[in-house]
Each structure stands twice: as C-alpha cells, then as structure tokens.
Amino acid sequence: MAAKPKLNVHNFPRPPLLEKTPRHLLMRWNGQTLADTKSAYWVLETTHPPTYYLPRNSLSDSFKLTQVPEKASLCEWKGRATYWDLTDKSTGQTIKNKIWSYESPTPAFTDIKGYLSFYASGVPWECFVDEEKVTPQEGEQLDPMWRRNLIDPLSS
C-alpha cells in the first residue's frame, strides 16, 4: 500500500473546515466492533489533528449510549457539545464522558448534528483510520486523534 501524503496541521484552516471523509473508521472494544463506517466527517482546524465524527447508526447494537446531562462544553465554531457515557451491554462496563456530539450545532456545522466523536486516549477502545491504529494525542483538552501521516505541530 502506498504511503499517504503527510498533512500539515499548520495548513489547516481557521475557522475549521468540515467535510465528508472517505476514510474507513473502525473502533473495537473488548474484542467487539464498537463502530464501523465509511460515512464520517472530519473537522480540520489549525494546529489540531483531524477530529472524526461518526454517524450514530455506525455504533453497534451491543453498546448503549446515555447522555450526561450535567456535562457540556461550548465551541465557538460548532456550538454546545453534548457528552455521552457508553456501556458495553455484554459486560456492563461503562466509560464516562469520552464521547461527544453536537445536537444543535451552528449553521456551518449542521452536517454533523447527532454524529459522535470519540476520545482515543484514556479509553479501553482502539481506534483505526484506514486500518491504521490511532495514536492518542497527549491530554484530552485538544482534539482526540493523531495519525502517523500528520506533521506534529510541536515539532514542525
């Protein structure tokens, strides 16, 4: 397989760009497929790695989402984020506050209304983009997913 070209996060726009991505996104937890889609969006923003948003129907029926009413955050571009807990129905294990969505996004981001984004760090699931395992970004205050074909904003 040919190497993908490097993406320089310094060239990503501000305000952020929302677009469909043809990339195959796969998430696995406890040996099960958590989510699988080729119908996602990504948001590209200056100095941030891409943030992927998966359609809710890509989530396996083996898992249950529960809204976290006491937690929210505000993005100046996308609007108010809603947070979710995720429970593995087979084990009862619940991961709290590691998924978010925009249920009433700003007009420029209506395409991701109800789509889910997952942190890649501090969680038991594995995330893959085009069969490449995601390397989590340090900390969670920024976007969740690094990929090897990105130029690191701290070292470039």
Image (tube, rainbow, N blue to C red):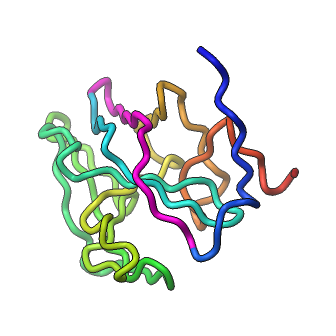
- In this view, the residue farthest toward the right is 155
Residue 58 locus on image (x, y percent): 23, 43
Residue 63 locus on image (x, y percent): 18, 43
Q: What is the magenta range? A: 16-32
Residue 92 higher or lower than 47, as above or below: above
Please state if 40 lies on the left or on the right of 133 as rendered. Answer: left
| Residue 153 is a magenta residue | no
Q: Quadrant of the N terminus?
A: top right
Where residue 73 sits, quadrant-wise, is bottom left
Q: Residue at x 62, y 54 (%)?
A: 49
Q: Main secondary structure of the magenta part?
A: strand
Q: Residue at x 19, y 62 (%)?
A: 66
**Closer to us: 116 or 122:** 116
Please state if 2 lies on the left or on the right of 6 as rendered. Answer: left
Residue 87 locus on image (x, y percent): 22, 48
Where residue 22 sits, quadrant-wise, is top left
Q: Residue at x 56, y 70 (%)?
A: 16
Q: Residue at x 44, y 34 (%)?
A: 126
| Residue 26 is a magenta residue | yes
Residue 12 higher or lower than 120, as above or below: below
Please state if 129 lies on the left or on the right of 65 as rendered. Answer: right
**Closer to us: 111 or 25:** 111
Please state if 138 lies on the left or on the right of 116 as rendered. Answer: right
Residue 70 locus on image (x, y percent): 30, 81
- In this view, the residue farthest toward the top is 1
Residue 80 higher or lower than 97, as above or below: below
Q: How many marks?
A: 0
